[in-house]
Amino acid sequence: MTDRALQSLDDLAAAGLADPAEPRLAEVERAFRIRVTPEMVAAAAHPAVARQFVPAVEELSIGAGELSDPIGDVARSPVTGVTHRYRDRVILHVTRTCDVYCRFCFRREVVGGEGMLSDADLAAALDYIERTEAVREVILTGGDPLVLSPRRLQAIVGRLGQIAHLDQLRIHSRVPVVTPQRVDEAMIRALRVPVPVWLVVHVNHEAELGLDSRAALGRLADAGIPLLSQSVLLRGVNDSADALEALFRALLRLRVKPYYLHHCDLARGAGHFRTTIALGRQIMAELRRRLTGIGLPTYVLDIPGGFGKVPVTGDHLVEDGPGRWLVRDPDGRMHPYADPA
Ligand code: SF4
C-alpha cells in the first residue's frame, strides 16, 4: 500500500490508476482537485471505488441544468460558514478540506479551496447559532469536519455543546472509511460533549470498507456514538439492488444504520454518475423486498437551487413526461427536474 495520498495525475499514473496518454485529463485536473488516500488507493482495485476518485474525461462535459452550487448553500447562507435552509437546523461548514476528493461531489467547486473557516468567521457563525434559538440541530460538514485536529474539533464541538437550545449535533464525514487511522482516542474524546453527537458516515460501496475502516467504525460504536450512513446513488458504482444490498448489510453488521441514499446532485461535470429517478425507485422497491426495515435508507433528492431535500416518493414527485418530473418542496411549491438525457 502507498504510504501517502495521491494528489495529482502524475501520482495516479505512477500508481497505474490514470492513463498518462490521455491529454484531456490535464484539463480535468485543472478544474477539480485530486486526492486519494492510501486506503482508497488499495481499495481502487475494485472499479466501483476507482470510479469515485480517479478523474475521467467525462467531467469536462457540463450537462444542461448542472450548477456550481447545486443545492443552494450560498443562497441560504446568513453568515459565512453557515447554511440555514430549514427553520430548526443549520449546516456549519467548518473546513473546505477533505481527505479525498470525490469526482461526483456536489460541493466539488468549493472543497479543496481556502481551507479552514477563519477564527473570525467561526466566531460569527457560532454567535449566529447561539442567538438563533429556533435552531435545534447543527450539522457539521465541509469539506470534512473530521480532518480537523482533535484540538480544534473539541473547541468547536465543545462550544456548540454549551448552547442550551441545541438538541444534537450531526457530523457528516468520509474519514472513518477513507482515513480510518484518524479515528483515535483523541478524536473520540473530542466528541464527548454534553449534547449528543451523531456521526453520518459517507460510504457508497462495500469495497470501501477495508479492515481498518471496519475497526474504526467499531471504535466509534463502542464509544457510544450513534452511527448513520449516507450514500449517493452513482451510475457505474452502486446502481443495482445487489451492490446496495451488500453495502447496507455490511453497514448493519458494523452497527451503522443506513440513513440516506441521495440521488446524485446536479454538480457540474458529474452527469456520467447520474441515474434516472425511475431506476432509483426500482432499486429501492427491490431493496424493500430484500432488506429488513433498519437496513433501508430514505431515497432523497436535493431540489436544485436550495429548495430543500425531499424523499423520492409519490408525495413529492409527479411525472411530467418521459424523464421529466415536478418536485414538491417542503413548502408545497413545485420545481421542474429532468433526468439525464
Ligand atoms: S465533501 Fe464529501 S463528497 Fe465532497 S469531496 Fe469531500 S468527502 Fe467527497
Image: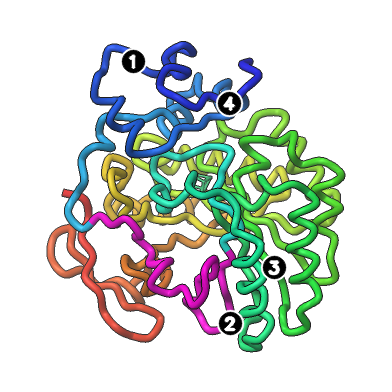
Q: Amino acid at mark 1?
A: Asp
Secondary element at tag 3 = strand
Q: Which mark is residue 88?
A: 2
Farthest-out residue, left? 321
Residue 200 included in the magenta stretch of the image: no
Between marks 3 and 1, how big is the CA–CA gap? 42 Å
For the point 56% across and 43% down, the residue is: 98
Q: Amino acid at mark 2?
A: Asp
Secondary element at tag 1 = loop
Q: Is residue 148 left or right of residue 315?
A: right
For the point 77% across and 35% down, the residue is: 215
- Sequence-wise, the earlier of marks 4 and 3 is 4
For the point 13% across and 65% down, the residue is: 321
Q: Which mark is residue 19?
A: 1
**Which quadrant of the figure has residue 10?**
top left
- Sequence-wise, the earlier of marks 4 and 1 is 4
Magenta-highlighted residues = 66-92
Image location of residue 260, percent across then percent down? 52, 58
- Sequence-wise, the earlier of marks 3 and 1 is 1
Instruction: Tell me: residue 23, above or below residue 53.
Output: above
What residue sits right under mark 3 in the picture? 169
Q: Amino acid at mark 4?
A: Ala
Residue 71 included in the magenta stretch of the image: yes
Camera-nearest label, 2 or 4: 4
Q: Which mark is residue 5?
A: 4
The verdict on label 2 being within 8 Å of ligand 1 is no
Q: Amino acid at mark 3?
A: Leu
Secondary element at tag 4 = loop
